[in-house]
Amino acid sequence: MSGPHSVEDLLRSLAPQVLGVLVRRMGDFDACEDAVQEALIAAARHWPEDGVPGNPRGWLLQTATRRYVDQVRSEQARQRREERMAQEPAAGDVPAGDDTLMLLFMCCHPALTPASAIALTLRAVGGLATSEVAGAYLVPEATMAQRISRAKQRVKASGPGFEVPEPGAKGWAARLRSVLHVLYLMFNEGYATTRGPSLHRADLSGEAIRLARQVHRILPGEGEATGLLALMLLTEARRPARTSTDGDLVPLTEQDRTRWDRRLIGEGAALLANTIGSGPPGEYRLQAAIAAVHDDAAHAKDTDWPQILGLY
């Protein structure tokens, strides 16, 4: 791995995983996020010159843990926190699993309103800057910064509760709705970014698809979770034809459909078909069905518009 973009991409993918582990161990979301941010800054400073360590995730977790301990000591809580840390595995013993999904559900905490949970998750899991989250909500950046800060404080004040609820448990449905909406917004920001010179951010939409796959894997019977993944795949399939060689947007009716990713279209269509009989379709399944009709047409003139109208 070489080059600043490679390091930046690696850090973006590792950040939520490291934050998930640290929050699970320590319980203080706000302090853990600060510690991880400091570890990321240290990595961005040293890795391009010294090389990426053999275990970059472990390096980040160990560095973030040290930063966290320093924060705790400065707040006169060293003894209490170190006793908790003594009961956990050593910082270098990094679990093999990916804690990103756990962090996703933790951010959608029942103490938060859905809007606050979504904003917090986009920031902590999606890696969006506060300005990008504000753009997704069409509010000023300062307003969104205050909302995210209040959300973290409310989670901290709510006490224990950093766990993924069991399907069917109290609050499960509302929390799952927030999680799916987070992934939906995250994908949209990657597919049609609101900031920067590019029309899309493949890293962000790719992360949304990865997380949606995880949700579908653990909840294969949830029709809307499956529908959301199908929608992402059916939409992502058009990305190669969505921009010209100059980077300009190409309208759907003018796209070279031979460049569409037929593998993703087939996967998305199969997922959508598997949701038949799993109850009335919601917003994500309906949007996926519309996308599937578009993707099924070899040319724009072949589009089944009556079917699309019926779905709308």
Image (spheres, rainbow, N blue to C red):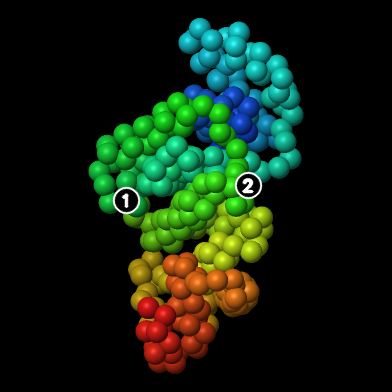
**For residue 310, side relative to residue 146 (left or right):** right
Observer able to see residue 309 = yes
Occupied quadrant, residue 141: top left
Occupied quadrant, residue 263: bottom right
Q: Position of residue 50 (x, y in %)?
A: 62, 30
Q: What's the residue type where badge 1 is placed? A: Tyr
Tell me if mark 2 has few (under 14), some (14-19) or many (20+) residues whose alpha carbon lies within 10 angstroms of its own: few
Q: Position of residue 44 (x, y in %)?
A: 52, 33
Q: Which residue is mark 1?
A: 137
Q: Nearer the viewer, residue 112 or 237?
A: 112
Q: Position of residue 186 (x, y in %)?
A: 45, 54
**Furthest residue in direction left, as rendered:** 140
- The label on residue 166 is 2
In the image, residue 271 sits, relative to residue 185, either above or below, namely: below
**For residue 29, side relative to residue 113 (left or right):** right
Q: Earlier in the sequence, mark 2 or mark 1?
A: 1
Q: Nearer the viewer, residue 251 or 52?
A: 251
Q: Nearer the viewer, residue 92 or 86?
A: 86
Numbered disc 2: secondary structure: loop
Observer able to see residue 32 = no
What quarter of the picture does the N terminus occupy? Answer: top right
Q: What's the residue type where badge 2 is placed? A: Glu
- Residue depicted at 60% across the width and 15% down the height: 81
- The label on residue 290 is none
Tell me if mark 1 has few (under 14), some (14-19) or many (20+) residues whose alpha carbon lies within 10 angstroms of its own: some
- Residue depicted at 52% across the width and 53% down the height: 173
